Image (cartoon, grey):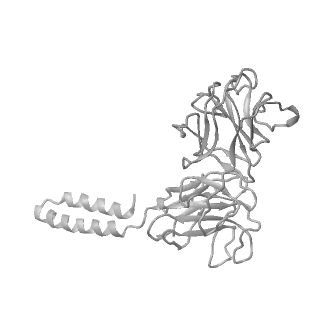
């Protein structure tokens, strides 16, 4: 419990223990005044501080005052008030959330603070934590002085000189950035994931982990950065584009991701809550803001025939009689039966 609130609680208990009504009345007025003052001067909610951007393999992006390109963590104060971080904790181990404590440092309202994950203590005028971040993925935990977790960033692999952070600053959605912005506003990431291939009547082509022939949707990352699909949406209805929401899943550059268009399946696979109609249904991919990223318009598909792009991620759309779920298409084994205008 907050110390100020605990004191108020004890004073209220004391007030009710008084047996003289006139003293209770006077004490109540004084107590109400005290509550009003404390409410006005209480610090901003610690939930207004978030881990905003991370770089775990800094080679050429930015150097500290010792000319060392160390890993770094950027915090962001979402509130309209300055917040003193003295006594807060930062850790790369959820089992040891109090691994490193902040010195006396204030993060201004709507501002950022850079913490170097360098294991160094000999550099002045900068904030240096006593641990480094593994680029293979470590969970970062930010805790308040009472040990309560304020924010945490999931463990993900982050390539060299690429950062992983929130857009917009302080928001809920995480992205990879090829142009890191330490102590500056994060930039809107370019969308590079597309609908690549779909099958609406899977009879003999491929089974899921349970051995079932379900319809499927294949996505492809056409860019040079990983993309976190958490919060993206898939749908087969233009009237309801936010029909199914992706969980935390990262698609690497040049990687295919298969989503089964079925209502149930293995925990290790992705399953939507809708199926595809082979007589023709729209398939829509939307980002976390509900903006349309890509779309396949309704087209009739036969059994074990897919509809997709050639080359992978390209502009040519065709009915494909040799489907390639989760794999690259090759012209030598690709027969185009129909090419829409």
* Image height of 111 relative to 267, above or below: below
- Horizontally, residue 328 falls left or right of residue 190, namely right
Looking at this rendering, what residue extends furthest in the right direction?
332
Q: Quadrant of the C terminus?
A: top right
> Is residue 93 visible from the viewing direction of this image?
no
309 and 53: which one is in front? 309
> Is residue 177 visible from the viewing direction of this image?
yes
Image location (x, y in percent) of residue 82: 46, 71
- Name which residue lies at 60% across and 69% down: 184
Q: Quadrant of residue 124?
A: bottom right
Q: Quadrant of the N terminus?
A: bottom left
Q: Quadrant of residue 247?
A: top right
- Name which residue lies at 77% across and 46% down: 254
Q: Quadrant of residue 42?
A: bottom left
- Name which residue lies at 64% across and 66% down: 181
Image location (x, y in percent) of residue 128: 64, 70
């Amino acid at each position: 419990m907050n110390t100020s609130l605990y004191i108020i609680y004890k004073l209220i208990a004391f007030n009710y223990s008084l047996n003289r009504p006139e003293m209770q009345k006077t004490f109540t007025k004084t107590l109400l005044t005290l509550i009003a003052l404390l409410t006005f001067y209480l610090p901003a909610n610690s939930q207004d501080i978030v881990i905003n951007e991370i770089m775990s393999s800094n080679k050429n992006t930015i150097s500290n005052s010792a000319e060392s390109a160390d890993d770094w963590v950027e915090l962001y104060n979402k509130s309209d008030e300055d917040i003193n971080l003295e006594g807060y904790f930062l850790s790369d181990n959820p089992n040891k959330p109090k691994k490193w404590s902040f010195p006396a440092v204030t993060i201004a309202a709507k501002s950022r603070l850079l913490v170097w994950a360098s294991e160094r203590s000999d550099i002045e005028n900068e904030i240096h934590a006593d641990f480094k971040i593994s680029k293979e993925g470590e969970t970062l935990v930010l805790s308040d002085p009472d040990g309560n977790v304020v924010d945490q960033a999931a463990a993900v692999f982050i390539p060299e000189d690429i950062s992983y952070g929130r857009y917009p600053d302080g928001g809920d959605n995480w992205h990879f950035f090829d142009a890191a912005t330490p102590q500056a506003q994060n930039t809107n990431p370019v969308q590079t994931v597309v609908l690549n291939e779909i099958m609406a009547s899977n009879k003999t082509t491929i089974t899921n982990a349970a051995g079932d022939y379900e319809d499927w949707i294949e996505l492809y990352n056409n860019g040079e950065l990983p993309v976190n699909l958490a919060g993206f949406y898939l749908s087969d209805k233009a009237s309801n584009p936010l029909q199914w929401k992706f969980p935390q899943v990262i698609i690497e550059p040049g990687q295919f991701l298969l989503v089964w268009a079925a209502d149930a399946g293995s925990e290790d696979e992705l399953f939507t809550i809708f199926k595809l109609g082979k007589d023709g249904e729209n398939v829509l991919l939307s980002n976390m803001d509900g903006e349309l990223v890509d779309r396949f318009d309704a087209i009739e598909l036969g059994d074990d025939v897919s509809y997709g792009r050639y080359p992978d991620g390209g502009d040519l759309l065709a009915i494909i009689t040799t489907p390639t779920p989760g794999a690259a298409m090759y012209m030598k084994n690709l027969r185009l039966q129909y090419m829409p205008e």
